[in-house]
Amino acid sequence: MRLPRRCWRNAASGGGRRAVSQSAIVRTPSPDDQTQILIVRGELDLATADDLYRRGRAAIGRHARLLLLDLADLSFCDAYGLSAFVRIANEAQAAGCRLGLVTPQPLVVKMLRITGLNARLPVFATMEEACHHLMALTETASDRSRRQTAE
């Protein structure tokens, strides 16, 4: 299988070719400390997926109630990227944190749908929609927990 020419670059050793991935994951401050936003840019693949997972896990470790992955500038995502999303979702669920994927590109939406992960990973068109929906779920879950404790 040949990679598209845009994915190739001369390697430092001997001028050969190797595939490269460029991705940036940026944490943005949110109005409250209970919401963490990670902006994912570029390509999410073998070379970058573990970094996203580590940053997602770190955000969850800061006791976030919501973790939002802003995917508006994510141009490519392969199976390793999807795996990172699932691993972060598992960590979030274990910690009582809600996860949302926000403004993904059509290619990412298609991959989520084809793999069935759209049923596991909630996708939202805007940050506002994600916050509103996920906070409502969080409040409902905590109300239910309080009622069970009181009984």
Image (cartoon, rainbow, N blue to C red):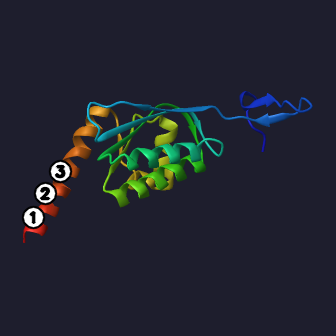
What residue is at 27 percent from the left and 30 percent from the top? 31
Question: Where the N terminus falls, by quadrant?
Answer: top right
Please tell me which residue lies in front, 88 or 9. 88
Vertical side of 112 occupied by 68: above or below? above
The residue positioned 26% from the left and 36% from the top of the image is: 129
Judging by the rendered image, the residue that carries numbered circle 1 is: 147
Instruction: Name which residue lies at 45% across and 56% down.
Output: 116
- Residue at point 12% right, 68% down? 149
Q: Residue 4 appears at what percent x and percent y?
A: 73, 33
- Judging by the rendered image, the residue that carries numbered circle 2 is 143
Residues at marks 2 and 1 touching, judged by CB atoms closer than 8 Å: yes
Q: Earlier in the sequence, mark 3 or mark 1?
A: 3
Q: Nearer the viewer, residue 124 or 21?
A: 21
Q: CA distance from mark 3 to mark 1?
A: 12 Å
Q: CA distance from mark 2 to mark 1?
A: 6 Å
Residue 134 has which mark? none
Disc 3 marks which amino acid?
A: Glu
Asked if marks 3 and 1 touch (Cβ < 8 Å), the reply is no
Along the horizontal axis of the image, is 9 left or right of 150?
Answer: right
Q: For the view shown, which residue lies furthest in the right direction?
A: 14
As helix, strand or loop, the secondary structure at mark 2 comes to helix
What amino acid type should be assigned to the residue bearing mark 2? Asp
In depth, the one of 25 and 62 nearer the eye is: 62
41 vs 2: above or below? above
x, y (%) of residue 32? 26, 35
Q: Quadrant of the C terminus?
A: bottom left
In this view, 38 is above or below 1: above
Q: Residues within 10 Å of mark 3 (few under 14, many from 20)?
A: few
